[in-house]
Image: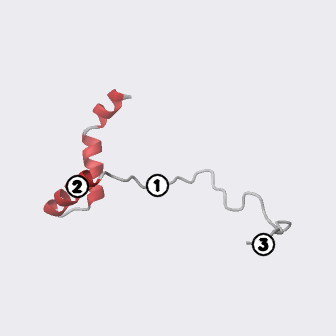
């Protein structure tokens, strides 16, 4: 790494996008991940679909916890 860097030609906010959204990864515990993967394999769908459906079906329960 250099001791000094020249930012004189830098442009502030060049890559900033106000409407950008991030899809952050969610890590499941090993037992839950195994269950979801096995269930998804039996149903022949993507594990992401299984997790989304489980959360959608329990949305009211999750909201009542808040």
Which mark lies nearer to you, 2 or 1? Answer: 2
**Residue with the mark numbered 1:** 23
Residue at 26% across, 48% down? 53
**Residue with the mark numbered 3:** 2
**Residue with the mark numbered 2:** 36
Q: Label 3 neighbourhood size at 10 Å, few (<14), some (14-19), many (20+)? A: few
Which mark lies nearer to you, 3 or 2? Answer: 3
Which element is circle 2 on? helix
Which of disc 1 and disc 2 is earlier in sequence?
A: 1
Residue at 52% across, 52% down? 21
Quadrant of the rendering where the C terminus is positioned = top left
Disc 2 to disc 1: CB gap under 8 Å: no
Q: Residue 14: name its quadrant.
A: bottom right
Residue at 78% across, 72% down? 2
Q: Nearer the viewer, residue 19 or 48?
A: 48
Q: Label 2 neighbourhood size at 10 Å, few (<14), some (14-19), many (20+)? A: many
Q: Nearer the viewer, residue 12 or 5?
A: 5
Which of disc 2 and disc 3 is earlier in sequence?
A: 3
Q: Which mark is residue 61?
A: none
Residue at 23% across, 52% down? 31
Residue 35 coordinates in the image, percent (x, y):
20, 54
CA–CA distance between discs 2 and 1?
20 Å
Residue 62 coordinates in the image, percent (x, y):
32, 34
Q: Residue 34: name its quadrant.
A: bottom left
Would you place residue 63 above or below residue 46 in this image? above
Q: Left of 19 or right of it: where is 15? A: right
The residue most toward the left is 42
Which element is circle 1 on? loop
Disc 3 to disc 1: CB gap under 8 Å: no
Q: Left of 19 or right of it: where is 66? A: left
CA–CA distance between discs 3 and 2?
47 Å
């Amino acid at each position: 790494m250099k001791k000094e860097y020249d930012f004189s030609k830098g442009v502030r906010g060049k890559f900033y996008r106000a409407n950008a959204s991030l899809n952050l990864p969610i890590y499941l515990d090993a037992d839950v991940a195994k269950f979801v993967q096995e269930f998804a394999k039996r149903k022949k769908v993507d594990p992401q679909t299984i997790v989304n459906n489980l959360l959608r079906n329990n949305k009211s329960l999750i909201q009542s916890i808040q």
